[in-house]
Amino acid sequence: MSTAAARPMNDEEVFSEMNKMVAFIKQEAMEKAREIKVKADEEFNIEKAKLVRQESINVEEQFQRKVKQAQVKQRILESTLINKSRLKVLQERQSLLESVFVEARSELEKVPNDTEKYKKLLVNLCVQAFVQLNDTTVNVRGRKADIGLLKECVPKAAETYNQKYGKSVKATVVELTPLSDNVLGGVRVSALNDRITVDNTLLARLELSSDHMLPQLRHILFGQSPNRKFFN
């Protein structure tokens, strides 16, 4: 063994070795620090990308929700406007129909003014009622203003009924309980102690005609409904 190899290091040599070790450790630490920073940067970028992507998804979802909400509001608004428009049209149509029947009523009020035509009408209305009741004894009521005409027309109606149908009827004009002037004219004929009645007043005939003619009148005034699928 060499004596020089076994010689202990002096202070300068020890200091030099320590500096080398410190430099090595420092280098290792710097490399490790760089690795940690690189990894941290990668993880940060990955996490940032996730957050950005998730936020983008959230923004898109919120946008789609707002779009859907806007579409729903738009549909509701359109439906409301359409319904209001339809209701307005129906109201205008109903108003027009009512005006037609008001005009018809005003024309009926003039019917009794032509006495001769009105007497013929009273006879026909009485005969029609006699046929419907098909009884031998009936009571005939009319407006107070028509009592005189009824006394003249009811016997003629009974005679006409007998001639056309071969049946006799005892028809009595009831004077104590006349009809209201609101019925416009015509007669109300009853049998079996007033338990069965045929209302042949002008107002009743107008209301009956209104019900029966309403579909035809709508067609004449407004045309065929596009929603109607079946026809008579």
Image (cartoon, rainbow, N blue to C red):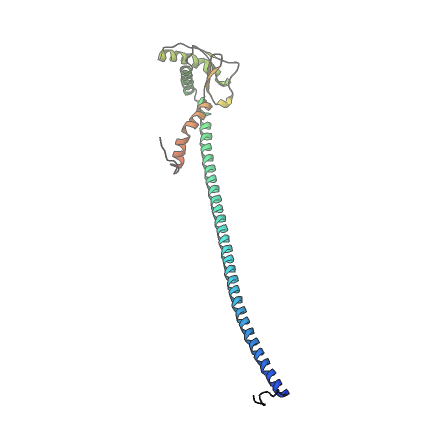
* 79 or 15: nearer the viewer: 15
- 115 or 125, which is in the foreground? 125
Residue at image x 41%, y 33%?
Answer: 218
- Which quadrant: the C terminus? top left
Q: For the N terminus, which image quadrant? A: bottom right
- Please state the total of marks drawn on the protein image: 0
Residue 132 location, quadrant: top left
Against 59, is 150 above or below?
above
Q: Residue at x 43, y 13 (%)?
A: 154
Instruction: Where is residue 72? Give x, y as percent.
Output: 49, 48
Q: Is residue 87 above or below residue 131?
A: below
Query: Which residue is rendered at x = 40% and y = 31% of the image?
Result: 215
Eyeballing the image, is 54 above or below 146?
below
Question: Which residue is more in the foreground, 164 or 70?
Answer: 70
Tell me: 2 left or right of 138. right
Closer to the camera in the image, 145 or 62 = 62
Rendered location of residue 60, percent (x, y): 49, 57
Residue 170, image quadrant: top left
Residue that protrudes farthest toward the right in the picture: 11
- Where 141 falls versus 231 (above or below)? above
Please state the horizontal and vertical placement of residue 180, each as a whole percent of the image. 51, 20
Q: Position of residue 194 (x, y in %)?
A: 49, 14
